[in-house]
Amino acid sequence: MAMTSVVCLGQFLPSDAGNYAAKVVTLTGQVSVMKDFQPWALSVGDSIQVTQRVVTGADGHALLQVTDGSTVEVYPNSTFVFRQNPGNWRDLIDVFLGRVRVHIEHLGTTPNPNRVLTPVAVISVRGTTFDVTVNDDDESTTVEVEDGTVEVRHALLSGNAAVLNAGSVYRVYRDEPIAQGINKGNAARQALRIVVNVIAIVGRTSGPGRISLPGGGGTGSVGDTGGKTPPPAAPPPPPPPPSSLPLLQH
């Protein structure tokens, strides 16, 4: 159904659609566009036209550039449609499978709003670099921001929007609304980092037969003092005083 809609849209493209094409800057492996339901291999210097579907093989990788300097980097085993909605040039790509990295070029002081769409997410940007990965199993979408800020909304459910800054990771699921202010990816990363740090500290401070925890506390094995010096033994009692009785004379 999606493929048919792309073909039909191609029959009603605006006259200036060629100005919004993308150029192949670098390419390795199998990277193709679909024409008449058949893959046509791309080469460096070729153009990706509006509403064309791009497909990469297991070794496919390409960097595409649009006229404003923005780029789309596509990784192996990925599928997206370039400007599927020609009525809105801000809709840059629709990602259906795999991973892409998008860089939206700043236009001086003028905003450069663009959108990347997936089956479950709408990602709005003004000038930034971020990765989008669509899972093949459930179409869940992971957004990872390298630079700048993006806004993520659910494509199917109404509700909040998540604003992600550089270093943020967020995953959108088909049946779960956006949780505003909660960054699942960052929370998981921080929890994992804490566990790793604790394990590293324990490994450095533990000796044979005991585990020492940060802060000096610890649990020991039988006969262990937990790393603390035992108190000194009590001194022996003083000897009894000499007897005051007189010595017997023989």
Image: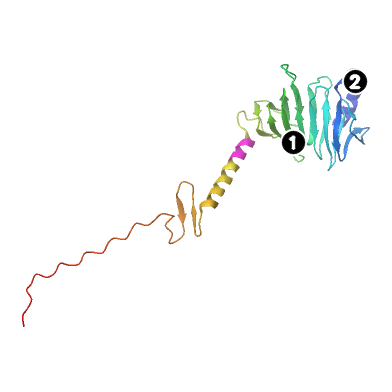
Q: Earlier in the sequence, mark 2 or mark 1?
A: 2
Left or right: 60 as drawn, with respect to 193: right
Q: Position of residue 140 (x, y in %)?
A: 72, 36
Left or right: 56 as drawn, with respect to 119: right
Q: Which residue is mark 1?
A: 133
Q: Residue furthest bottom?
A: 250
Q: Position of residue 125 (x, y in %)?
A: 72, 24
Question: Residue 23 occupies which quadrant of the picture?
Answer: top right
Q: Secondary structure at mark 2?
A: helix
Disc sitting over residue 12 in the figure: 2
Measure how far apart labels 2 and 1 are at the Cα level: 30 Å
At label 2, which amino acid type do we have? Phe
- In the picture shown, does residue 174 fall above or below 126? below
* Other residues around mark 2 within 10 Å, as few (<14) / some (14–19) / many (≥20): few
Q: Position of residue 165 (x, y in %)?
A: 65, 28
For the C terminus, give its image quadrant.
bottom left
Say whether residue 12 is magenta. Answer: no
For the N terminus, give its image quadrant.
top right
Task: State if disc 1 and disc 2 touch (CB < 8 Å).
Answer: no
In front of the other: 185 or 119: 185
Magenta region's main secondary structure?
A: helix
What residue is drawn where x is 62% and y is 36%?
186
The boundaries of the magenta stretch are 184-190
Asked whether residue 155 is in view, the answer is: no
At label 1, which amino acid type do we have? Thr
Mark 2 or 1, closer to the camera = 1
* Other residues around mark 1 within 10 Å, as few (<14) / some (14–19) / many (≥20): many
